[in-house]
Image (cartoon, rainbow, N blue to C red):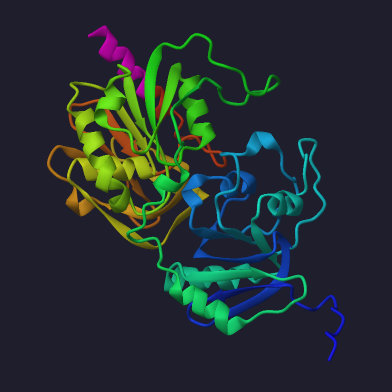
Amino acid sequence: MPTPALTLKTPTACIALADGTIFYGRGFGATGTTVAELCFNTAMTGYQEIMTDPSYAGQIVTFTFPHIGNTGTNPEDDETADPVAAGMVVKWDPTEASSWRNTQELGDWLAARGRIAIGGIDTRRLTRTIRQQGAPHAALCHDPDGNFDTDDLVAQARAFAGLEGLDLAKEVTCAQSYRWNEMRWAWPDGYTTQDAPKHKVVAIDFGAKRNILRCLASAGCDVVVLPASATAEEVLAHNPDGVFLSNGPGDPAATGEYAVAMIQGVLAKENLPVFGICLGHQMLALAVGAKTIKMSHGHHGANHPVKDQDTGKVEITSMNHGFAVDSQTLPEGVIESHVSLFDGSNCGIRLEGRPVYSVQHHPEASPGPQDSYYLFERFAQFMDERKAG
């Protein structure tokens, strides 16, 4: 029999969870199927930055804020060359973009980059499922004809190995070293370059966001970016004034199989400032003898309260992580500097008496608040002090 004509009510996309739950909706972006871990993000802005954040490799992102796509996309907001998140889930279909910065509609932007998205989903129900049961494995399928083999999709979700034990940093790191001098966006000139740097910084790229590198440049740094596989000898050969450990995806213990030795070699350099963010924070913790754990559903959003243990100040931060440092395993001489006020999980460490520190949250924002930008200035201050002897 001929296939009946599609109606407006015919679903063109679906999400199949490993427990057999099926969500139907309307597809946009690329067609096909993708399988990944499903998480949710509570940010109200910055969907393009989120989709291009390398830390989201291996994950489908559910956006709890319904107005996704209404400002379109533009090349300036990419955090890396192409989207890294496996897929997008939204409540309402994207509307026509309304922004003077828009250069391409969200659906067209996703389609051109091979990323699948689904709209018309009860994201409240889906988010509750993730919060109560943990981040599930899911298969997201977009078929304009509405033909779905749901049994096969559920089987694909169940067959997904998950992120534990998975080294994804090697998938998103740069292929070779490069220099970075672009600074943070500022009105009216946009992005400008750092022409008078004071410090040479080596940044280890575990999946670095562009805005982190911009923040380093704005803090007065001449940044050399090295791949995640760089050795301590390769890092120190640049004679850096400081070393930065970037954000990134996957299981930190898996990346640590090769990166911990590098970090320990760098830490052996007396009084060399070291600063880590997100995966870089977890890698520093592993290097000093702590352990990391997989979280139930992680922290993903731009509204997470974090307390600075030293000052008592509460900062609203941007978060994106599914693993955390186990604060119970921090060795003597490693101070817990920041904690999450949502669940008490570790959000920062510092080495007692040394210019070495890291945070789990994202002080560069993009998207999110800039409460924690001072951490970049602290890094520059430590490098100033080391030069002053």
Residue 387 drawn at (x, y percent): 28, 10
Can residue 19 be seen here? The reply is yes
Q: Is residue 389 left or right of residue 203?
A: left
Where 181 falls versus 39 (above or below)?
Answer: above
Examine the structure image and report whether residue 282 is included in the region drawn in magenta. no
Can residue 337 be seen here? The reply is no
Where 2 falls versus 283 (above or below)?
Answer: below
Where 381 falls versus 15 (above or below)?
Answer: above
Residue 194 drawn at (x, y percent): 53, 15
Q: Main secondary structure of the magenta part?
A: helix
Examine the structure image and report whether residue 380 is included in the region drawn in magenta. yes
In the image, what residue occupies the spot 71% across and 20% down?
188
Where 315 falls versus 110 (above or below)?
Answer: above
Residue 298: name its quadrant: bottom left
Q: Is residue 124 left or right of residue 175?
A: right
The residue furthest left is 332
Residue 378: name its quadrant: top left
Residue 359: name its quadrant: top left
In the image, what residue occupies the spot 55% across and 53% down?
85
Residue 86 drawn at (x, y percent): 56, 57
Q: Which residues are magenta?
A: 379-389
| In front of the other: 280 or 139 | 139
